[in-house]
Image (spheres, helix red, strand yellow):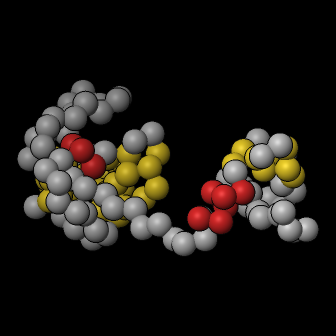
Amino acid sequence: MSDTLPLCPGCSSEHAYEMGALLVCPMCGHEWSPSDAASDDAPVERVVRDAVGNVLADGDTVVVTTGIKVKGSPQGIKQGAKVRGIRLIDPVNGHDIDGRVDGFGAMLLKSGLVKKA
């Protein structure tokens, strides 16, 4: 192993240390193997697909395929509602699309519940 250890992939802390065959970050508790750190150098492009398998991109317009219940609202988002100008984000509890839904405002959506218009 070299004298310098890689930064933590979880929190980018420089305080990683070796524990057996793994590297450990004391700041966030993330554990990873050194071979994973070497393969992480190449950026991985995440592909987001809609309910029917079409690849989605930032700025696309999508249509809701099923009715979605919205917490705190008496009615939900109806099937067929358009969401214009979506933005793909890192998944948050399975929600990987950020967009504005008419009548509801900014909202996070799951890509499996929409299809490309």
In what quadrant of the picture does the N terminus appear? bottom right
Q: Residue at x 22, y 35 (%)?
A: 68
On screen, residue 75 versus residue 92, left or right, reads: left
Q: Position of residue 83 (x, y in %)?
A: 21, 57
Q: Residue at x 84, y 54 (%)?
A: 16
Of residues 53 and 81, the one drawn nearer to the viewer in this rendering: 53
Q: Residue at x 22, y 63 (%)?
A: 55
Q: Residue at x 63, y 57 (%)?
A: 36
User: Is residue 84 visible from the viewing direction of this image?
Assistant: no
On screen, residue 46 versus residue 53, left or right, reads: right
Q: Is residue 96 shown above or below 3? A: above
Q: Position of residue 114 (x, y in %)?
A: 19, 49
Q: Quadrant of residue 13?
A: bottom right
Q: Is residue 49 shown above or below 40? A: above
Q: Quadrant of residue 45?
A: bottom left
Q: Is residue 43 shown above or below 31? A: below
Of residues 74 and 10, the one drawn nearer to the viewer in this rendering: 10
Of residues 65 and 14, the one drawn nearer to the viewer in this rendering: 14
Q: Position of residue 17 (x, y in %)?
A: 87, 52
Q: Position of residue 112 (x, y in %)?
A: 24, 44
User: Is residue 22 visible from the viewing direction of this image?
Assistant: yes
